[in-house]
Image (cartoon, helix red, strand yellow):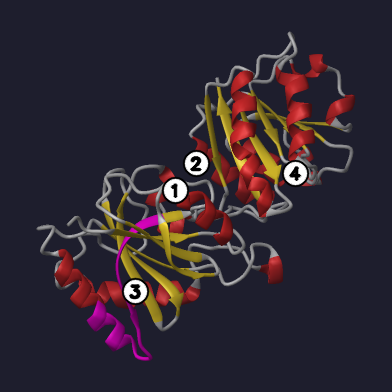
Amino acid sequence: MTDACFVMIGCQRGAEATLKSQLADQDWRLAFSRPGFVTFKHDGPVETLPSNPFARTVSRSVGKARAAQITDLLTALDSTIAGLQTQRDQPFDQLHVWARDRAVVGEFSFEPHATNPLAVDIADRVFAHVKPQGHVAAHAPNLTAGSGQDILDIILVDPGEWWFGWHKATSLPTRWPGAIQPIDADKPVVSRAYFKIAEALAWSGLPMRPGDRVMEIGSAPGGACQRLLELGFVVTGIDPADMHQDVMSHRNMTHIRARAEDLKRSEYRDAKWLVVDANIKPAKTLWSVEQIVGHRDTRIQGMLLTLKLGSYERAAEIPHWIDKVKRWGFEKVDVRQLATGRCEVCLAAQK
């Protein structure tokens, strides 16, 4: 008989039903679910863990503990690690500890953050416990992992309920604790779009270089433009609304006060990259973008498109959106719900 495989997945609150439905098609059966946290079982060993746009984190689940005292939780962790040592003869490279989302992103001012105070405190205490025993090689908890490193994961489902697992760092989000980008702005940000574009740029891996021209549709008040300018891009924002004065004062910033559909296609002639984050339905976003990238005067090499779902039921349309973008000549297309996004997905495309 083959051993079953269990995985634990962190996600945004509200995305659980979509995960359950889509992973069922990959022969993963629901095991346990809480808002922002879902576990699945596969009847047999697997080489590759499941992948899904709404799965922020994916780890092999190896145990759990529930107790009122942290000493009891640490004892359960010791037992779990002892069991793992029968399968591995070296310490984990990193320790990542994070909490499931306590609310829907954007509600009650909630934003996922790598420095959640509860997670930081527990991470420090766990690290102080396991480091002397040689279970973790890192010099501190919750560091960005190197590619290929093995990471011991502890998800705080509740303060007194910990789930244990591990994963191997591959893509950049899998290297961040809780797949939340550790970024601190040097100065106050214009809007939360600053963090969204920062995460989208890092996750997508688009080969953008300082000096490249980027055009953003739906740019006001300028949060995304602020980050793009910091990274050295030449930015044109397209939006009928006002842009923040701090963004407009930058020498590499241009604002076109118009709607994208009213703009001559020749305006996009010198742009290499296109960013869209407009509060409209996905069908209209894709229609507007198709008119731009399909025009003979444009040479767009890559895009970051925010597609507003409105309802998670619309997630079923994602494969059709990917096929559509590929028909425009973009060979590499990926989709992910960003930790900093809301009920939406980011589509990254590159020729």
Q: Hey, which quadrant is residue 257 in on the image?
A: top right
Q: Quadrant of the N terminus?
A: bottom left
> Residue 328's spot in the image, x, y percent?
64, 19
Disc 2 and disc 1 in contact, CB within 8 angstroms: yes
Residue at x-position 49% and y-position 74%: 117
Q: Is residue 232 visible?
A: no
Q: Position of residue 30 (x, y in %)?
A: 44, 62
Residue marked by disc 2: 203
Circle 4 SS class: loop
Tell me if I can see residue 142 in this picture. Answer: yes
Question: Which mark, by number, is residue 317?
Answer: none
| Residue identified by numbered label 1 | 173
Q: Which residue is at 66% across, 53% downward?
A: 312
As measured in the structure, the alpha-carbon distance from the residue carrying label 4 to the one carrying label 2 is: 21 Å
Taking 266 as reference, is 341 left or right? left
Start and end of the magenta stretch?
58-76
* Marks 2/3: CA–CA distance: 27 Å
Quadrant for the C terminus, please: top right
